[in-house]
């Protein structure tokens, strides 16, 4: 088969979807010696540099220039998804198209596989506030219903896709995520000290790493920390790692005003964007990792932290219990006091933290990109057949 893959998210390598695509391509390169792949890459007016994995000769990158660049970024992206991709598929005479995120062509002339990581715009009211976003979501839903197969990244996502898109379960295939082999416990004191110095972090800290949109629930984490910090046996900073984006947008509440209001500027650290090579040392250096998200289709930061042997506290809803299993403490993310008490209990029990960290490492080993690639190949074959 000649398989086309929409490579748009290689232009956004720091996102979860970008990471997923990058490692999926590596897995396909290692485990598929039969098919050829064409990476279909848009060349946008304000394109950022793409990050391509090193791949074998069966992979070829093809760029297409947007015809509607002058109309703005959103129109340019929509043109690519609904017109540019199809033109590229015809030119390349492809047998199958894989769109690795929730947007595929409505009128595809070849079998299409769509990966839907989550259906957040259909489940969380705040993400439906703007008309343009609602229209784009409806278009994505219509296209997904016409896809030959859907890949969901968790059983939770599959159930939500069935319910919101009204698709039969046999068309939805669950294939999880995994993490890069670089995510492992880091014990070198120089690396651990280096990452603390680089981001201005002290010896003992509680870590959150992820986005700052409303569903990530960061404001409640800040409030929980404020409620319990006077009860610490020794001081612990709260480190909020990740890039603050779209500050001022209603979907991206800025936690810094709340931190100032609580007088915690010296105890809560904002790192900004974390370098890829610093992630494993950061997870390893943390006393514990807290991820109180209200909804996740999978929850990559949880698996990354577990692979590094961190003691994890996360939410008892959406896909997070499915990822964490019994190797993390699960809490109700809507209850600030529950988040705080879970943190306090683990800080006071180092032996339990050690047991959780070891269980987390074992759990993380169950997820591999090789298995993801092999399962994805099976879906490709079924879709064409």
Image (tube, rainbow, N blue to C red):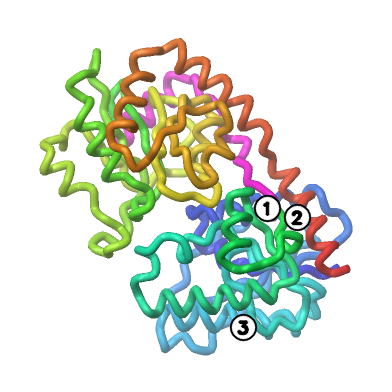
Where does residue 243 sit, x and y in percent of width and height? 35, 51
> 360 left or right of 368?
left
Q: Which residue is mark 2?
A: 376
Residue at the image point whose x is 67% and y is 73% from the top: 62
Q: Which mark lies nearer to you, 1 or 2?
A: 2
Q: Secondary structure at mark 3?
A: helix
| CA separation in Å, label 3 and label 1 | 23 Å
Q: Earlier in the sequence, mark 1 or mark 2?
A: 1
- Examine the rendered structure and indicate whether residue 134 appears above or below residue 186: below
Q: Is residue 70 above or below residue 289?
A: below
Q: Kindly indicate whether the residue at mark 1 contacts the one at mark 3 (C-beta within 8 angstroms).
A: no
Q: Secondary structure at mark 1?
A: helix
Asked whether the residues under the numbered discs 1 and 2 touch, taking CB atoms below 8 Å apart as contact, a structural biologist would say yes
Q: Is residue 188 left or right of residue 59?
A: left
Q: Position of residue 202 (x, y in %)?
A: 28, 25
The reply to whether discs 3 and 2 touch (Cβ–Cβ < 8 Å) is no
Pointer 3 or 2: first along the chain: 3
Q: Is residue 74 left or right of residue 119?
A: left
Please give the name of the residue rendered at 38% of the width and 31% of the height, measured from the top-left corner: 195
Query: What residue sits 11% from the left and 36% below the top?
Result: 263
Q: Quadrant of the rendered structure where residue 325 is?
A: top right
Asked if residue 200 shows in the view, the reply is no
Instruction: Give left or right: position of 287 versus 89.
Output: left
Q: Which residue is mark 1?
A: 24
Q: Residue most toward the top?
A: 351
Crowding at label 2, few (<14), some or many (≥20) Cα neighbours within 10 Å? many
Mark in the foreground, 3 or 2? 2
| Magenta segment | 174-200
**Residue on which disc 3 sits:** 84
- Rendered location of residue 200, percent (x, y): 27, 33
User: Observer-nearest residue: 283 or 291?
Assistant: 291
């Amino acid at each position: 088969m000649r398989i086309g893959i929409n490579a748009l998210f290689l232009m956004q390598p720091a996102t979860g979807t970008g990471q997923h695509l990058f490692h999926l391509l590596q897995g396909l390169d290692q485990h598929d010696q039969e098919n050829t792949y064409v990476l279909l890459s848009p060349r946008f007016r304000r394109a950022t540099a793409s990050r391509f994995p090193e791949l074998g000769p069966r992979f070829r990158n093809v760029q297409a220039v947007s015809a509607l660049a002058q109309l703005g970024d959103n129109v340019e992206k929509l043109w690519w998804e609904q017109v540019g991709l199809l033109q590229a598929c015809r030119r390349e005479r492809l047998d199958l198209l894989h769109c690795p995120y929730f947007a595929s062509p409505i009128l595809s002339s070849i079998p299409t596989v769509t990966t839907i990581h989550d259906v957040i715009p259909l489940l969380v009211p705040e993400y439906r506030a703007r008309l343009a976003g609602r229209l784009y979501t409806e278009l994505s839903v219509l296209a997904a219903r016409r896809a030959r197969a859907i890949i969901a990244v968790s059983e939770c996502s599959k159930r939500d896709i069935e319910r919101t898109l009204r698709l039969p379960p046999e068309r939805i295939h669950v294939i999880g995520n995994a993490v890069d082999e670089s995510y492992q416990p880091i014990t070198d004191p120089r690396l651990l000290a280096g990452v603390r110095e680089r981001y201005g972090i002290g010896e003992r800290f509680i870590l959150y790493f992820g986005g700052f949109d409303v569903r990530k629930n960061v404001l409640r984490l800040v409030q929980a920390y404020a409620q319990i910090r006077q009860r610490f046996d020794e001081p612990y900073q709260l480190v909020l790692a990740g890039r603050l984006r779209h500050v001022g947008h209603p979907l991206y509440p800025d936690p810094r005003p709340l931190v100032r209001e609580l007088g915690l500027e010296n105890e809560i650290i904002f790192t900004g964007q974390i370098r890829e090579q610093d992630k494993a040392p950061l997870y390893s250096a943390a006393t514990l990792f807290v991820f109180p998200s209200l909804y996740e289709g999978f929850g990559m930061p949880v698996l990354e932290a577990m692979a590094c042997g961190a003691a994890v506290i996360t939410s008892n809803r959406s896909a997070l219990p499915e990822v964490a299993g019994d190797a993390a403490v699960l809490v109700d993310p809507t209850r600030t006091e529950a988040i705080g008490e879970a943190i306090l209990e683990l800080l006071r029990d180092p032996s339990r933290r050690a047991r959780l960290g070891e269980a987390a490492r074992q759990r993380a080993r169950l997820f591999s990109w090789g298995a993801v690639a092999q399962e994805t190949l099976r879906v490709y074959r079924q879709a064409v057949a």
